[in-house]
Image: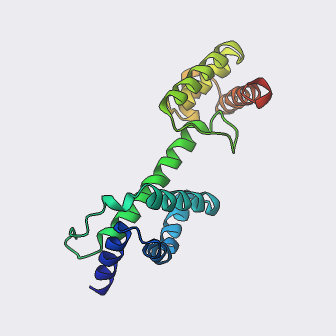
Amino acid sequence: MQHNNQDAVLLELLKDGSVEAFTSVYKKYSRILLLLAVDMLKDEDKAQDVLQEFFLDFWQKKLFLKIDANYQNRDSSCIMKSYLYASVRNRCLNKITRERKFSCVIPDEAFVPSDPLESKEIYFQVNIALNKKVPPKSSTAFRLRHYDQKSHKEIAEEMNTSIQTVKNQIGTAVKILRGYFAPAHL
């Protein structure tokens, strides 16, 4: 019960704009939230980035105002703790989704758009490049793999070729697309 009362007090202090309360929440939860993020992302640097962005938003955007201090679930666990866990978990899932969506074409460390219009523009540009720059069989294999989410085996069966040929064709498409989207071409 002490734990819950402490979080309720911290929450009230946060709502009053207390930097000390924010620091206390950070010190209390950052380590366990980092472990959660590392476990999900499998990369400590990315996990630290997610955590840093979350705590920055938590304070600057006053996300703590979304926490209802009077609400506690059946097992009496703290709503602040639940909110922090859910928020970091969701940010990790969003990061994983964005990376999967764009890793097929965009080189590592590249800009991943957060704006859906930018995502559509990239999709449009990739399709243009697939049609104009990539050989037809490589383009087909790439689309089946990355747009239709088919396995190499399924693609090989559909294209009546070997799995290794499919891998080579996809590799060729990715290499051409990466070259096409290199900063010198943009």
Quarter of the image where one finds residue 173:
top right
Q: Residue furthest right?
A: 184
Residue 20 at x, y = what percent? 46, 76
Callout count: 0
Residue 43 at x, y = what percent? 62, 60
Q: Is residue 8 above or below residue 88?
A: below
Quarter of the image where one finds residue 144:
top right
Nearer the observer, 139 or 35 = 35
Q: Is residue 83 above or below residue 137?
A: below
Residue 104 at x, y = what percent? 62, 35
Q: Residue furthest bottom?
A: 2
Tell me if 138 is positioned left or right of 41 in this view: right
Q: Is residue 130 visible?
A: yes
Q: Is residue 13 above or below residue 182?
A: below
Q: Residue at x 66, y 35 (%)?
A: 106
Q: Is residue 160 visible?
A: no
Q: Residue at x 69, y 43 (%)?
A: 108
Q: Is residue 82 above or below residue 174?
A: below
